[in-house]
Each structure stands twice: as structure tokens, then as C-alpha cells.
Image (spheres, helix red, strand yellow):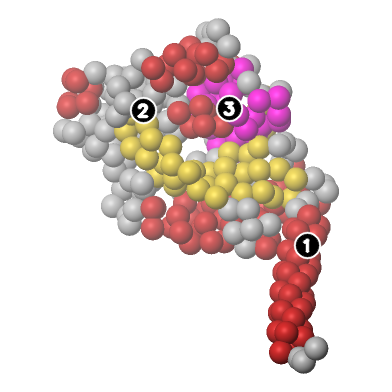
Amino acid sequence: MALAQLGGALWCARAAWQPAPSICEHMPGFATKEAYPSRGPLLVADFLIPEVIGRRYVEIGSRNGDLSTCLSHFARKVIVVEAETPYCAALRARNLTVLCHRVTRENVALLPTADVYFWWMFSSLNLELARMVHSAMVARNRSAKVYFPVDTMGIVPGAPRDIKQVYEQLEALRSARFGHSGAVERVFFDETLDDRQTELGEPVAAEGNVASYAHEFYGRYGRWGVLHMLSARVGKIHGTVQEEERKFKLKAELGAKQAELKAKEKELEQLEARSPP
């Protein structure tokens, strides 16, 4: 079944008020190793599919690789940069290309070149990482797009909700550094399995993930919610932005001069109308 047909069928199979199931679950041989919030919701992969089709994709921090494994069915190349050694082994076992190290300012030159980058980390790290990827792409005279979500519920239990950082980070992504390209969209998801899991949190994944109405797990009371997906262009964008800004300025100046000319033409017509023959 074609991707568009499969997506349409999945949407038609749900109630209008429910998030659709993920296309990932229908990929050959695909099976999840974790559940939200241990990893990002599968619908994040659905969100990214149109962006990665036929392109190079890098996920920074993937744990057991559910999202990257799904996207490997669509992207031309998938690479995971993972800092935790046990996860590196798990990712390689899923036939994913892995670089096992943490991305830092000192080693950002080792970051693989890609068209799309994605991560889900502590929100306080988002802009720093976006700037590092931007610097790496500028150094290579390339451009790319970065995506990173902010969870409505936050990541750190007991800490203020991360949603408060969305506006601040969006404003930063709309700066000249990122070509005024910052944007945000919302991904609604519900990975509930059944009523018993919803109410009592029967563990179905590693780490005793009991997120439910009855039990909190990393600040979540269920496997549903909203991710605010921030994005921006990075790398070689400044030349293009300067050209666009110059064109905008010239058009504004031209428009002002045309308006001034029309006003003078009208004034001249009025004077000629009042003049004796």
C-alpha cells in the first residue's frame, strides 16, 4: 500500500477526536522497544516522514532507536549519535549506523552531515545544540533543518513545565542567525494500549514504565499528550536571507516612490483642472 493510502486508511479508522495510530506500526518487521515517555511518541516519526523521504537523517540521542528504525524505511540514510554505550549496542543490533559519543562544542566537527537533524532532550539544551549544528553546517558550507520538541508535561519531575520555554526558544530561532526561519507545530499523541494500562499503568516496557492515572512516571500520568515541535533552518542561510531582506527593502522603497509619484500626478491634475483655458 502506498504511503498516502496507508496514512489515509489509518486516519479513517479512528474517531475524529482521537490521534491517528502511527504508520511505524505497519512497517515490515518493526516492533517498539520502549514506550513514551522513555522515548518520543511514535507519531513524531510520522511528523518527520515527509521531511526525511529520500534525505539524510541524523537523530541525536535515540536510546533504543524506535524512531530511527521507523524512519530508516523512508530516509536515504539514517545515522544515530548516541552518548550511552549500552544503547549504542542496542542500536547496532537494529542495523542502525551509530556514532557512540556525546555531541559537544569540542567534537561538533564529528557530527555527520545530514539534511534533517532531530533530538528530544532537556529543553534547556535545545538552543545550545541548535547553535552547534548550525556552526557545523556553516563550516561545511551546507544547510540543513533541525527539529526538537518541547513536551507540555516537561521532562524533569517536579520542575516547571517546559512549555514555558517554547516562546523564548521560538523567538531565538526567528533571529537572523537562523534566517528568521523558526516555526512551531503541535503533535498530539496517545499511545494507550488498553483501559487497564490507562488506569493502573501495567508495565509494558523497560524501566517499569507505569505512566497512568494511578501512577506517575517521570511526571506523566499516562502515555498521551502534546509535543510542541520547534524547527529552524541552520547552516548556509545568511547569504540567502540577506538577499531576501535586500529585495524586501528595495520593493518597499520602490513602492514608496511609486506612491509619491502618483500623489504628485494627482496634484498636477488638480492644478491643471483649476487653471484657466
Q: Distance between the residues labelled 3 and 1?
A: 33 Å
Residue 30 vs residue 274, the one in the foreground: 274
229 relative position to 249: left or right: left
Confirm whether residue 81 shows in the render. no
In the image, which is nearer the foreground, mark 3 or mark 1? 1
Q: What quarter of the picture does the C terminus occupy?
A: bottom right
Q: Which residue lies furthest to the front in this view?
A: 277
Residue range of the region highlighted in magenta in the rendering: 49-73
| Residue matched to label 1 | 247
Q: In this view, does 153 lie above or below 10?
A: below
Q: In this view, does 24 lie above or below 45?
A: above
Would residue 57 be counted in the magenta stretch?
yes
- Badges 3 and 2: C-beta atoms under 8 Å apart? no
Looking at the rendering, which quadrant does residue 205 occupy? top left
| Residue matched to label 3 | 49
Would residue 192 be counted in the magenta stretch?
no
Residue 64 vs residue 78, the one in the foreground: 78
Q: Distance between the residues labelled 3 and 2?
A: 17 Å
56 relative position to 243: left or right: left
In the image, which is nearer the foreground, mark 1 or mark 2? 1
At label 3, counting other C-alpha atoms closer than 10 Å, the crowd grade (few under 14, some 14-19, many 20 or more) is: some
Q: In this view, does 155 lie above or below 239?
A: above
Q: Distance between the residues labelled 1 and 2?
A: 42 Å
Q: Which amino acid does label 3 sit on?
A: Ile
Q: Which residue is drawn at 76% across and 91% down?
A: 275
From the top left corner, tell me how far across and down residue 175 is, in percent: 62, 62
From the top left corner, tell me how far across and down residue 94 is, in percent: 58, 17
| Residue matched to label 2 | 19
Q: What residue type is labelled 2?
A: Pro
Task: Indicate which disc, 1 or 2, sits on the residue closer to the N terminus.
Answer: 2
Q: In this view, does 112 lie above or below 68?
A: below
Task: Indicate which disc, 3 or 1, sits on the residue closer to the N terminus.
Answer: 3
